[in-house]
Amino acid sequence: MAPRTPAPVEKVKLSDKHIPLRIAATIFFMVVGASALAYAISNFFTGTKGWREIGTLESDGITCAQDFSFMYNVGSDRSVSAENRELTEIYSHSAKRAYELFNTSEIEGVVNIATINASPNTDITVDAVLYEAFEKILKSGDRTVFLGPVYEIHNGLFRIEFKEAAVDYDPRLNSDLAKIFERLCGYASDSSSVDIVLLEDGKVRLFVSQEYESFLESNELTNILDFSWMKNAFIIDYFAKEISSAGYKNGAISSNDGFSVNLGGEDTSFTVFHMCKDGVYPIGVMNYSGTRSIVYLRDYLLSETDSERYFVLENGEIRTPYIDISDGLCRSSARDMTAYSDDFSCADIVLRISRLYISREFDESLVDLIRSSGIQLIYGDDSKVYYTDSQSPFGELFKESSHIRVEKAK
């Protein structure tokens, strides 16, 4: 086949007739073109009705939004541009505020976790978001928030470049470090050594005994308080509260570490995964409507971003952020666990299931206790997945996981 060549050029002589008409036509099409371009630009910035991801404002600077995805069905109640603009402002300002408040590093002009850690035994006025978070912590009796010094060391695993350096952060590889972790856990478990005291007018006091303070100083540790892996559960609840209180219900928020909230106005779904001997499988889809909070905990990696929270040793063992307060070692009683509730927030769920999940053994007696409180569980072993709901939560089961039995927990 002969190669293609350009078509012959045909010379066309333009007529000199109807000059005014051609000028008018040119102006008309320029106006039409400008209008079309304006519409395209407007549509680019405002968009059409439907689901879209809400972002943050550049003017807000650093936020925690990179850990979350906020999807909203814009244009349901008001104009697309108005909803998008207001949702972006609410979400962006909230993401900035949450980033600053729960941070264990000092931020100029902000009273945050770092501020409290730097001023033990001192009355400090804190933001209402932090005050409410401490209220939940104290009411639950969970004391993992006081594992700050353990997290300060252990979380260094997720930042090292060479696996050989793991010995400096992993108590399972370092017996001297294991002893320090045991001491720190002993202090964290003891309210006479460390505690958070809620005072009037939004003030709190981080109580630290002289003995514990001396131990921390001798080991050059500063992070007494740290919400660590639970932090995003509290943050996503804060997002949901801010967005819902502004009248927005047609959306859902999720974090990259397993927390999800449906605001209530739209039907939505959640895919449940499970790890068995030969890999991770999507078990089924949970379809639901109305408000719902979901917590998904796991001891394995699912995406590239998981390297920020999980560390894989050369022998294939995985270190997770879930620290057992009994001895400072990370552990999980099940490979994964999905917990959900239409009445409780993500933080409420986490504070109720952490004792079951972060444990040497899976305690079946706690399952009934959690279920009776209004929280449903999905968990399993290599060949079975159990659910506690009165009816199966799955609207659809995946064929890929057909070798895994799904049944109601006894």
Image (cartoon, helix red, strand yellow):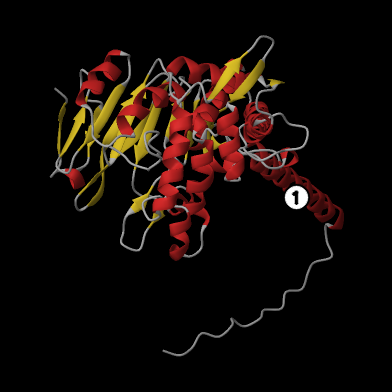
Q: Residue at x 51, y 51 (%)?
A: 156
Decide: is 321 above or below 169. Answer: above
Residue 268 image offset from top left, x and y in percent: 39, 28
Location of the C terminus by quadrant is top left
Q: Nearer the viewer, residue 260 or 198?
A: 198
Q: Residue at x 25, y 26 (%)?
A: 393
* Residue ID at (79%, 53%): 26
- Which secondary structure, mark 1? helix
At label 1, the amino acid type is Phe
Q: Nearer the viewer, residue 136 or 73?
A: 136
Label 1 belongs to which residue? 29
Towards the viewer: 70 or 75: 70
Residue 34 in view of the camera: yes
Q: Looking at this view, is 163 or 405 the one in front?
A: 163
Residue 76 visible in the current orientation: no
Residue extending furthest toward the right: 20
x and y percentages locating residue 227 in the rendered image: 52, 32
Task: Report which quarter residue 316 is drawn in.
Answer: bottom left
Work out which residue is located at the far top of the displayed protein and give it. Answer: 200
Residue 324 as seen in the image, left or right of residue 362: right
